[in-house]
């Protein structure tokens, strides 16, 4: 005999839903529908199991370290994903996809990484109407658009079968950091430059940690050393460019500018007026008691030139465009710039003697067949620069500038066009950034029999 149970009115409704089965057990025969959350079209797709958790940041923080891998994950990468039996294009494509999954590449970080791969000939830019669908069954769940394009028929991107392409991690890193980074990142924002370099260094570190391509391990390590150098040399080259022209170059330019425009020669301006003009040109506050003539004589003595020259007759005899590389930097002694005159000691801005050698700095500007056939000038160029400029210069840095030569043999930098680190490289792939392949026309051209009058009539009817 079953025991009686007293129930309240509040649970009477739920008690009616309980029935007895054959064994005498009570079960709930009513099944509630599963609650499913409708995905919003703006919500990003779910990332895979190996992706970076949102609580871990982006993966590019200063002290971030990858979590240790499980034994089965390491075995899967070693024997399947990054197996040495697979060709290099397949391994690097898988590495790019999985790296994007293990880092939170969003916004500008994704653009920087795509630009870096584009310089190396890999296309990872998402095309319009491509979508961001994800294969949830894949162990490294990532958008299909993240895989690089290895289309051998495109002249714009890398083809493994093309003999004109070589695998060079150091060269691609140098070309991207030295040429592309100052363009795509704001030159006045050091954080943007640091982010670009960090993206490249993180990807190279990922290749080493996961043994993606051990045949290029020395090249990858060299590229990582270059990224470490770039963290200091690239901001220095940009700061050096921003400090030009400097006080010395502005002084010589101010004295000789009348002759540049082929105007009648004018006497040297009074020291007070010239000093004020130098402050405006060089963006430098001059010390009290500054005399431009005295400062000019100090510079001429450092160059070993005649200080008794009539400065009102200075004129520019030629001003070629030079590509120069720093050979040595010799700062002048401090005592040379302390001059006692007019009853007071004036400390003039210090100068440094720079020795350049001629070099070749390639860019996207085609110099033409004539200039390309000319040999690089031999010899060296010795000039003076302000110490506040040479503080950002290092031996090996390259300068592209117009060098003016005066009639007394003194040379100075009249216009600066670029200051580059020692590892500056211009890659031909930079010329292919805006390349579009030509598609054959399917429409026949007009002829004597078909002049296009029918199409013109159709157009008039549509109007």
Image (tube, helix red, strand yellow):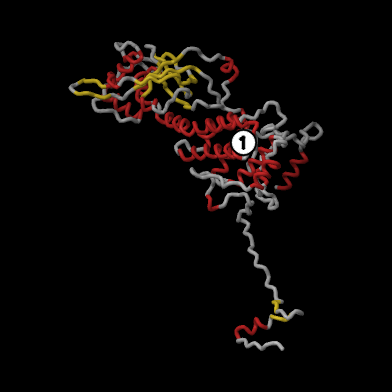
Q: Nearer the viewer, residue 68 or 436?
A: 68
Determine whether 78 is above or below 264 in the image: below
> Farthest left residue?
343
* Above/below status of 290 relative to 131: above
Q: Residue furthest right?
A: 449
Task: Quadrant for residue 406, please give it.
Answer: top left
Is residue 379 toward the left or the right of residue 142 in the image? left
Residue 175 drawn at (x, y percent):
56, 30
Residue 302, position as x, y percentages in the image: 34, 15
Q: Residues within 10 Å of mark 1 (few under 14, many from 20)?
A: many
The residue tagged 1 is 118
Does any portion of residue 257 appear in the rendered image? no
Could you tell me residue 23's position as x and y percent?
A: 75, 79
Name the residue rendered at 69%, 49% in the picture.
138
Nearer to us in this view, 369 or 28: 28
* Residue at the (68%, 38%) spot, across then down: 91
Nearer to me, 382 or 333: 333
Q: Please, is residue 442 above or below residue 362 in the view?
A: below
* Residue 109 visible in image: yes
Of 386 and 247, which appears nearest the observer? 386
Query: Is 359 left or right of 82, judged from the image as shown?
Result: left
| Viewport quadrant of the N terminus | bottom right
């Amino acid at each position: 005999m079953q025991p009686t149970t007293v129930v309240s009115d509040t649970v009477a409704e739920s008690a009616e839903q309980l029935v007895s089965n054959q064994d005498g057990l009570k079960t709930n025969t009513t099944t509630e529908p599963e609650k499913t959350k409708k995905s919003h079209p703006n919500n990003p797709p779910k990332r895979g199991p190996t992706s970076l958790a949102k609580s871990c940041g982006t993966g590019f923080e200063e002290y971030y370290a990858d979590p240790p891998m499980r034994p089965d994950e390491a075995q899967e990468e070693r024997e399947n994903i990054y197996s040495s039996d697979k060709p290099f294009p397949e391994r690097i494509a898988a590495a790019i996809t999985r790296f994007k999954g293990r880092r939170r590449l969003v916004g500008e970080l994704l653009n920087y990484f795509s630009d870096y791969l584009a310089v190396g000939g890999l296309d990872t830019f998402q095309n319009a109407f491509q979508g961001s669908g994800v294969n949830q069954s894949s162990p490294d769940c990532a958008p299909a658009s993240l895989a690089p394009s290895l289309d051998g028929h495109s002249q714009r991107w890398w083809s493994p079968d093309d003999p004109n392409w070589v695998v060079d991690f150091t060269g691609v890193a140098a070309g991207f950091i030295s040429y592309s980074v100052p363009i795509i990142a704001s030159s006045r924002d050091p954080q943007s430059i640091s982010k670009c370099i960090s993206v490249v260094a993180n990807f190279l570190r990922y290749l080493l940690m996961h043994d993606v391509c051990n045949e290029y391990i020395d090249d990858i390590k060299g590229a990582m050393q270059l990224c470490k150098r770039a963290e200091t040399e690239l901001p220095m080259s940009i700061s050096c460019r921003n400090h030009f022209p400097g006080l010395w170059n502005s002084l010589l330019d101010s004295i000789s500018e009348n002759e540049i425009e082929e105007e009648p020669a004018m006497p040297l301006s009074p020291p007070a007026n010239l000093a004020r003009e130098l402050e405006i040109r060089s963006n430098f506050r001059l010390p009290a008691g500054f005399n431009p003539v005295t400062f000019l004589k100090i510079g001429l003595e450092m160059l070993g030139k005649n200080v008794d020259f009539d400065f009102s007759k200075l004129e520019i005899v030629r001003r070629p465009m030079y590509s120069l590389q720093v050979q040595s930097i010799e700062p002048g002694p401090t005592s040379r710039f302390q001059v006692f005159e007019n009853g007071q000691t004036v400390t003039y801005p210090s100068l440094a003697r720079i020795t350049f050698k001629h070099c070749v700095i390639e860019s996207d500007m085609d110099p033409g067949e004539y200039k390309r056939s000319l040999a690089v000038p031999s010899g060296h160029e010795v000039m003076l620069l302000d110490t506040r400029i040479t503080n950002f210069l290092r031996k090996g840095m390259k300068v592209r500038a117009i060098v003016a030569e005066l009639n007394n043999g003194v040379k100075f930098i009249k216009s600066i066009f670029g200051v580059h680190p020692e590892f500056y490289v211009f890659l031909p792939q930079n010329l292919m950034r805006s390349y579009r392949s030509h598609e054959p026309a399917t429409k026949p051209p007009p002829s004597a029999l078909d002049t296009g009058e029918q199409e013109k009539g159709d157009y008039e009817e549509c109007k």
